[in-house]
Amino acid sequence: MIIRKDSIIGKPEVMVYILTYNHAEYVEQALKSVYSQHTTFDFIVVICDDFSTDGTRSVLEKYYELYGNKTILILNEVNLFSRNKYDATFRNIKNLPHVKYTVVLEGDDYFLPGKLQAQYDVLEGNKDVVSTTHLTKLADEVSGEEMVIPDYRNAIYNMASTRELMYRGIMFGNYFASNSLFFRTKYLYEIDIENDFWNCYANDLATFLFFLMCGKMYCISAVYSVKRRNNANSMSADSNKINIDMEKRIFDIEARMKQLKKFDEISQFEYHVAIANKIQLYEMAILRCKNFERRTYYPGYMGIYYPSKISWIMLSSMHEICNKLFRNIKNKERIDSLFIHVASILIR
């Protein structure tokens, strides 16, 4: 690992941690969106490149020369992700200079103006809030379609309790884009990085659930970032590749099951019923993978493999119904049982 670091000006309160890997086509927009943020506080930019080979590093070097007094550049000498080192980000953050708040950005996504200041103000003004998120524009590089996530048509997220958000996270997956999460870093400094919970293929959900477990999450009803989908080297593109390889599909599901089981332990089994139900759905999905030569993967919501778009549409409708039920039903085990019943019928 090569680390480039000059004298940092000021006393940064916020760290923007940027992950890059073969993002030459997009990374300049990501960097501009960060360095152009107008704030009343100092922030530091940490860029970690996971052994890019497409010219990404020349762009990073260019911006390091421009903003070296507020930048730390980490250049991996091998690709850690391909070696199953999925916890490198958390390890780096724990070992970097300590800051009050942190936000993570992938090199193919970007921030919108005002993001850092808006989220900083929320945490500064609400000492009982651990993290904050916001709406994100999801841009599909293949279809050209755009949508805002999460779906606020039912206006429930900014009113939802931490416990309700936790249940949604377990049953449906991470509703919020990873680049929307802005958190108090002190909680990350205290984690046991050797716990396998942090070393999973897709860590978005792990981070989301962990900070919900730590305390309140404030959801801002404004769009402050853009997340690309289905572009080269993105996680969503990897999901499409998983469609082709049945063994990789099973590996992906088993990794998520393992992560949920670890979360069950560190949360002291407070959400055991929801986790057990979700694992049951994953087990059924694995059976489908083993019994059928090919099925299509529709990521999101319940995060399992469905046999057809009809099932996906039906389950999406069930999601809308569940949103309404969440408003009135306090016993979340009834919600879990409803989903198990419906999902088990759809994926048989």
Image (cartoon, rainbow, N blue to C red):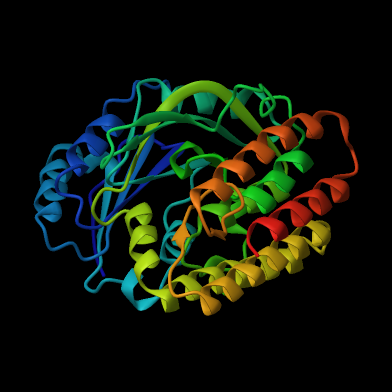
Residue sitting farthest toward the right = 331
Vertical relation: 261 (above or below) 49:
below
Residue 71 % position (x, y): 27, 45
* Foreground pick, 188 / 148: 148
In the figure, residue 313 lies in which quadrant?
A: top right
Is there any visible trace of residue 231 in the rendered image?
Answer: yes
Looking at the rendered image, the quarter that the C terminus falls into is bottom right
The quadrant in which the N terminus is found is bottom left
From this viewpoint, is residue 196 visible?
no
Residue at left offset 76%, top offset 40% = 164
What residue do we see at 66% from left, 29% from top? 157
In the image, 82 versus 126, the foreground residue is: 82
Residue drawn at 81 percent across, 46 percent down: 335
Q: Nearer the viewer, residue 265 or 14?
A: 265
Query: Is residue 228 found left or right of 259 in the rendered image?
Result: left
Q: Going by the image, does 156 lie left or right of 205?
A: right
Asked where in the image residue 127 lies, by quadrant, the reply is: top right
Above or below, 64 relative to 151 = below
How many marks are shown on the rendered structure?
A: 0
